[in-house]
Image: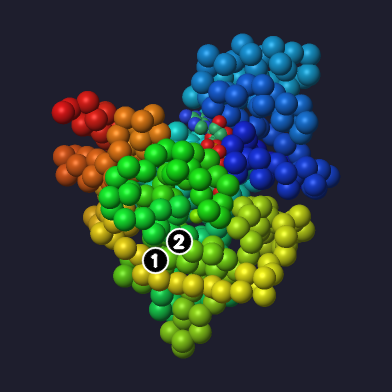
Amino acid sequence: MRTLSVLGATGSIGASTLDLVRRNRSDWRVVALTAHSNAAELARLAHEFGAQIAVVADEEHLPALQEALAGSGIEAAGGPAALIEAAARGAEMTVAAIVGCAGLAPTMAAIEQGGVIALANKEALVSAGDVMMAAVAHHGATLLPVDSEHNAIFQCLSGGDAADVRWITLTASGGPFRDWSWERLMAATPAEAVRHPNWDMGAKISVDSATMFNKGLELIEAHHLFPVGLDKLRIIVHPQSVVHSMVEYRDGSTLAQLGPSDMRVPIASALAWPRRMDTPCAPLDLAEIGELTFRKPDEERFPATRLAREAALAGGAVPAVLNAANEIAVAAFLAGHISFTRIAAQVEDVLGSYAPPAPGCLSDVLDVDTEARARARMLLNSP
Ligand code: NAD
Ligand code: MG
């Protein structure tokens, strides 16, 4: 039996994680479950899994959580400090599944305990980059990628030597707009953007998928997780989302990981690592799928991967600025304030207006994030 915390328990990744835990109850003892504001759902999960503590990040919802957990013996807490305290309770495994840079401080708190971190929260790694990787090394933590592409690469690299890698190829579905013209993209609505053809995900990552910022963030994520050099990281569009990524070695062998478009597969791979566990996912039926196709990404219509590559090359604080600007732009798009094509333009504008020095610690990263958000909001309000 191992102890487990799920940061972002009420989200899409949180739900998939807890579905696997539910099927293997005797393997896990749940320490902390956290959510942003959905106190009712969080309390329900905390009851079901017998959590030690439940935390709502938004303190306004603490009274509702306390009421729902009254008499249960489960601690209820609220606010950013409580979130960090819960993440630092030393669970052997922490699933980092908060969306956005909001997950950075609690993820770092978990890393500092030296346990195993199953990382879905890519924005945290993109923003903190070297600072997070240094903390992982310093505290002897183990970072297991949950993002399907990175989980695929991690599997394809096992047993291999990074020095023998010729290419790492991240696959991208291309999102719901992959075949749309620029004119059509300009008028794309939030409802259209969150309707992903292959994956069922939270709203933010669904928009990132549509703009290709998701793949851009993943390129930066891969650059930190698999330090083979940016020039060896490539992106290919693969509309069926069956091949989750590939590693080509110098002898010409390419290893790929395939599977259904169900996040429970990479989550299970992290939960059971280095072993394997059952999942209820439908087996891969390649004869039924029939065809796997691949094509080059189009950076004219989707400039996000270019911006991300430039940010990764520049390094330092630039990826944190890119991430913060994107988070603000995505929220503005979802709220109906800016057009779809304005998202990337807005990110590029913020990158051009703010070039802080490289962060040396977590608080530097958080400062860059705060300032980049402020500038992004200012840009939104300027004519
Ligand atoms: P989601 O929106 O469904 O869930 C996000 C979770 O974070 C919820 O529990 C929410 O309550 C919590 N949260 C939101 N804002 C918060 C804040 N300010 N403070 C504290 N908690 C907050 O998102 P998701 O789709 O589950 O994605 C979670 C992370 O996993 C993202 O970083 C995403 O990029 C990554 N990821 C998701 C998928 C997927 O299929 N959903 C795949 C790969 C990677
Ligand atoms: Mg992914």
Q: What's the residue at 27%, 41% (across, down)?
A: 342
Vertical side of 282 occupied by 370: above or below: above
Image quarter of residue 35: top right
Q: In the displayed structure, does residue 291 sit left or right of residue 165?
A: right
Residue 72 pos. (x, y %) = 78, 19
Q: In the displayed structure, does residue 317 sit left or right of residue 228?
A: left
Label 2 belongs to which residue? 172
Q: Is mark 2 within 8 Å of ligand 2?
A: no
367 vs 16, nearest the viewer: 16
User: Which label belongs to residue 235?
Assistant: 1
Secondary structure under tag 1 reads strand
Give the quadrant of the C terminus: top left
Distance of mark 2 from mark 1, alpha carbons? Answer: 7 Å
- Amino acid beneath label 2: Ala
Q: Are marks 2 and 1 in contact (CB under 8 Å)?
A: yes
- First in residue order: circle 2 vs circle 1: 2
